[in-house]
Amino acid sequence: MTDPHWPEPAAAPNRPRRALVAAAEVLVVAALGWLALWLWTRGTPVSTPVLDRPDLRLRDFDGPFVAAAVGAATVAGLLVVDAVRQLALAVRTRPGRA
C-alpha cells in the first residue's frame, strides 16, 4: 500500500545568477531613463514668443520623439518590475508555508 500523504515539496534552490540579471536590468533602466529624458527634450522644444504677447511661450510637440520617449519610459518601467522579480527569485531559498 502506498503512503496516502502528499510528499513534502522540495526547497526551491537559491539562484544567485538572477541577481546579476537584476543588476544588468537596473543598468538598462538607467540608460532608458536618460534616453527618455533626452528624447522628451528633443520632442518638446519651446518656440519663440508670440509678437503681440511676449509673456506667452508656446510648446510644440514633435510626435516621433515624444512617442519614443514614452516608449522608452514604458520599457524602463517594465524592466524595473522584472528586476524586482529577478532579485526576489535570487534571494528566495524556499517557498513560504501557508
Image (spheres, rainbow, N blue to C red):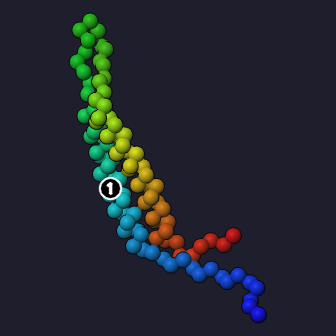
Mark 1: give few (<14), some (14-19) or many (20+) Cα within 10 Å.
Answer: some
The N terminus appears in which quarter of the rendering? bottom right
Q: Nearer the viewer, residue 7 or 95?
A: 7
The C terminus appears in which quarter of the rendering? bottom right
Q: Name which residue type carries label 1.
A: Val
In percent of the image, x 23 and y 18: which residue is there? 48
Q: Is residue 40 above or below residue 31?
A: above
Q: Position of residue 63 (x, y in %)?
A: 31, 31
In percent of the image, x 28 and y 36: which residue is there? 65
Residue 46 is drawn in which quadrant?
Answer: top left
In percent of the image, x 36 and y 58: which residue is there? 26
Q: Position of residue 62 (x, y in %)?
A: 28, 29
Residue 8 is drawn in which quadrant?
Answer: bottom right
Mark 1 lies on a secondary structure that is: helix
From the viewer's perspective, is 7 left or right of 20?
Answer: right
Q: Is residue 3 above or below residue 46?
A: below
Q: Is residue 41 visible?
A: no
From the viewer's perspective, is 2 left or right of 35?
Answer: right
In percent of the image, x 57 and y 80: which residue is there? 11
| Residue underneath mark 1 | 28
Looking at the image, the residue that sits furthest to the front is 1
Q: Is residue 28 above or below residue 62?
A: below
Q: Position of residue 16 (x, y in %)?
A: 42, 74
Q: Is residue 75 visible?
A: yes
Looking at the image, the residue that sits furthest to the bottom is 1
Count of numbered marks = 1
